[in-house]
Image: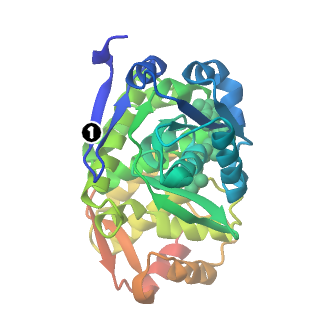
Amino acid sequence: MQKTDIKQIDVKVSKPYTVYVGEDIGKLIGETLQGERLFVITDSNVYGLYKGFLHSLSENVYFFEAGEESKNYKTVLKIYDFLIENGADRYSVVVGVGGGVAGDIAGFAASSYMRGVRLIHVPTTLLAMVDSAIGGKTGINYHGLKNIVGSFYQPESVFVDVRFLKTLQDREYFSAFAEVVKYGVIRDSELFDFLERNVDGIKQRDSKILKIVVERSIKNKVEIVESDERESGERAVLNFGHTFGHAIESLTGYRRFYHGEAVAIGMVKAMEVSERMGLVERGDVERVVNLLKLLKLPVSLPDGIDEGRMFEIMLKDKKNKNSSLRFVLTKGIGSSIIASGIKEELILEVIGEDS
Ligand SMILES: NC(=O)c1ccc[n+]([C@@H]2O[C@H](COP(=O)([O-])OP(=O)(O)OC[C@H]3O[C@@H](n4cnc5c(N)ncnc54)[C@H](O)[C@@H]3O)[C@@H](O)[C@H]2O)c1
């Protein structure tokens, strides 16, 4: 394959690296890492679907049972065993292939094995491509707490091939569009317009369209990460829709909604707060609602949600400093602000409102 088919996005953080977006990335990985010892970490589903590709990367392939339940220290210990038994040393390269779960576990194992070995990400879900593989956060769940143990650990490169998305289940695929729409709303109105114009191509998983969507989303995440590598300020805009979203996930026992679906509802609520504060027009709220609906995402709270409980959970959300509600709001599609001290009644009204 011609190298020109591959787009490169440089990530200028403390340890700079490159994200490659293209097709036939197996070949590119082989060329880039010729002669290096690779240790591939993946999950059982990705292994079942892409065995040939994985073994073409390395003879050392480890897979764990797919799913969030595996994102724990037991899996990390098994990965250490695999690395030790196969003679991984401090020059070896850990390659995480899969969704956010595989990336987070492989990243954490790589960051701690021998005090940190080289790490490559090959994201295979849309969420991993546009979000979790970019930004250097790794993590595992412990004691029932999500991502409570982890590290900031940048990979040395990320290889993205949108053709992996062809095998993704519908719900998995569409729910990740919540994060893509989010980039559009908080900082990239052109991306938002592009999504509106290309819903059919997105539904057909047209590689050409997906390459544009994924590349543009990665650029947005990269720019935010570059401005705030360790999440001390600007990176908070990525939480647009998430304060409501986390509360919805918590109230529904983390079962009813995929994360992206809860975020989609949360974004509609954040749009409504923005509207009530006079920051956006009703038309903007409607554009977001319509786009999310077209992308098969929910836009309103499920019946039976206890409004008071939801509000309490939001208050407890770790992103709120000093218990005053802190929200990422929009000033129109493509621009965001972090607002604090929003009146409680306003939030309660928005929770009670049917979108
Ligand atoms: N590190 C970060 O910055 C960050 C950011 C966002 C989310 N996350 C984490 O990401 C995780 C969620 O990621 P996810 O949604 O990718 O979940 P996931 O890794 O569990 O993948 C979802 C499902 O898709 C399957 N799959 C993966 N690639 C596939 C393919 N090409 N075709 C068919 N099936 C495929 C997986 O086996 C799994 O069953 C959460 O644990 C979350 O905490 C991390």
Within 10 Å of the Cα at label 1, are there few (<14), some (14-19), or many (20+) other Cα atoms? some
Between 84 and 243, the residue placed more toward the observer is 84
Instruction: Return the x and y of residue 263 as percentages of the image width and height.
Output: 51, 58
Between 209 and 211, the residue placed more toward the observer is 211
Q: Please report the residue visible at 40 percent of the width from the left and 49 percent of the height from the top.
A: 154
Quickly name the residue at label 1.
10
Residue found at the very far top of the displayed protein? 1
Q: Which quadrant does the N terminus fall into?
A: top left
Instruction: Return the x and y of residue 305 as percentages of the image width and height.
Output: 66, 72
**286 left or right of 227 in image:** right
Residue 23 drawn above or below residue 177? above
Residue 328 drawn above or below residue 153? below
Instruction: Return the x and y of residue 272 as percentages of the image width and height.
Output: 41, 67
Which amino acid, by three-letter code, is at mark 1?
Answer: Asp
Instruction: Return the x and y of residue 266 as percentages of the image width and height.
Output: 49, 63
Q: Please report the residue visible at 70 percent of the width from the left and 45 percent of the height from the top.
A: 81
Between 319 and 226, the residue placed more toward the observer is 226
Residue 332 visible in the shown view: yes
**255 left or right of 200 in image:** right
Between 258 and 353, the residue placed more toward the observer is 258
